[in-house]
Amino acid sequence: MKNNVKGINHVGLTVPNIDQATEFFKNAFGAKIAYDGLSYDDDPRQGSEVERMLGLSQGSKIIKQRMIVIGNSANIEMFEIKSNSQSEPLRLEDLGFNHISLFVENMDQAINDAVEAGAMPLSEKHDNSKYEDSTNSSSVYLKTSWKLLIELQSIPNGYYYPKYSEQDVFIPKD
């Protein structure tokens, strides 16, 4: 069942400072904040289990995570990460990007389809981040043979939002 994928949920982007990047996207493109999956007030996401599940280098810390919406399109999930292994952003001629997330209806089938096509899961399916963790939701990161990171997400009961939310996130339609 290869047509299990409903569309792109979000594209991941690591930035040096989320607040500055948000202001740029708001000013340049009218972006709106959907939610902060991790704020400066929260403890950083770190440790060997986080490193394993998300493919981070040892000692990396996710300091802040924010989902923004631009128009009626796929969302942009921004990360602010502290790491001793962090490199400069990719150039146009370089292969890859941070990650894309694909909405799927049947997570197990989607994982099987991806593995059959040559992808390798970084972990078993796991819970989603805050505001994506409604009943029966799950997520898993996979890597392709050329090291592209892809997230599969199933959120059958939808998102919920904080009071400061300015926009619901884009959800691909059937």
Image (tube, helix red, strand yellow):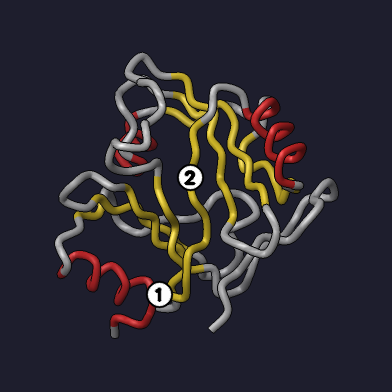
Amino acid beneath label 2: Gly
Q: Nearer the viewer, residue 103 or 8?
A: 8
In the image, residue 99 lies at what x, y percent? 40, 47
User: Which residue lies at the image location 37% right of the left edge and 71% below the top edge?
Assistant: 107
Residue on which disc 2 sits: 12
* Residue 140, image x, y percentages: 36, 56
Q: Percent position (x, y) of residue 119?
A: 20, 58
Residue shown at 48% from the left, 64% from the top: 8
- In the rendered structure, which disc, 2 or 1, sits on the residue that comes first in sequence? 1
Task: Look at the numbered disc 2 and give the secondary structure of its residue.
Answer: strand
- Image position of 168 (left or right of 65): right
Residue identified by numbered label 1: 5
Residue projecting furthest to the right: 163
Residue type at numbered disc 1 = Val
Question: Is 72 on the left-hand or right-hand side of 116?
Answer: right
Q: Looking at the image, is 140 positioned above or below residue 110?
A: above
